[in-house]
């Protein structure tokens, strides 16, 4: 059970990245009032803004896995972090709904790399017995 400190640091960074992405995913839900006031839109339009984020996220899952397999995980996750963070600032400081939609799409694309990248990092840095689920026996 004594794994290198570097493996745990990498796991921690990947976990923080996944947590950040999950926070971005619920941002539209917890900030409905603020977003609708900022853009002068209805809550229905805020839900469409959220839907665009999740649609881009879902559409990029398979390409994200292929990209992570082809290129260095470190660089892909760094670019993914930039694709989440920079449009977030655009979304926060923008008053244009079109820019908000574009920022949501880009954030969804960047978010698609987080979970798959974290799984790949865990599989590379920890032994299989820690990564794969153990056999679970359920007695009913």
Image (spheres, helix red, strand yellow):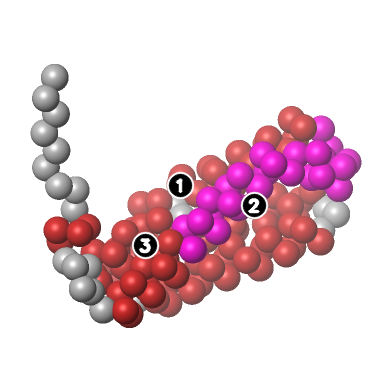
Quarter where residue 91 is shown: bottom right
Residue positioned 36% across, 52% down in the render: 62
Query: Is 37 covered by the magenta stretch?
Result: yes
Q: Position of residue 48 (x, y in %)?
A: 67, 37
Tell me which label, 2 or 1, sits earlier in the chain: 1
What's the residue at 36%, 68% (across, down)? 11
Residue ID at (38%, 75%): 9
Residue 58 within the segment the image draws in magenta: no
Residue 16 seen = yes
Q: Which residues are magenta?
A: 16-42
Q: Secondary structure at mark 2?
A: helix
Image x and y of residue 78, in percent: 48, 74
For label 1, the residue is 59
Q: From the image, state whether disc 3 or disc 2 is nearer to you.
A: 3
The relative height of residue 39 versus residue 47 in the rendered view (above or below) is below
Front residue of this view, candidates 18 and 117 = 18
In this view, the residue in front, 140 or 91, is 140
**What residue is pinned by disc 3?**
118
């Amino acid at each position: 059970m004594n794994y290198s400190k570097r493996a745990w640091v990498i796991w921690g960074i990947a976990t923080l990245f996944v947590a950040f992405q999950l926070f971005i995913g619920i941002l539209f839900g917890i900030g409905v009032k603020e977003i609708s006031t900022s853009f002068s839109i209805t809550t229905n339009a805020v839900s469409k803004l959220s839907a665009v984020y999740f649609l881009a996220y879902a559409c990029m899952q398979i390409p994200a896995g292929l990209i992570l397999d082809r290129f260095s995980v470190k660089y892909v996750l760094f670019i993914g972090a930039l694709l989440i963070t920079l449009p977030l600032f655009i979304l926060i400081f923008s008053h244009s709904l079109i820019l908000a939609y574009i920022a949501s799409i880009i954030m969804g694309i960047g978010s698609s790399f987080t979970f798959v990248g974290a799984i790949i990092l865990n599989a590379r840095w920890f032994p299989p017995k820690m990564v794969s689920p153990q056999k679970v026996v359920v007695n009913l």
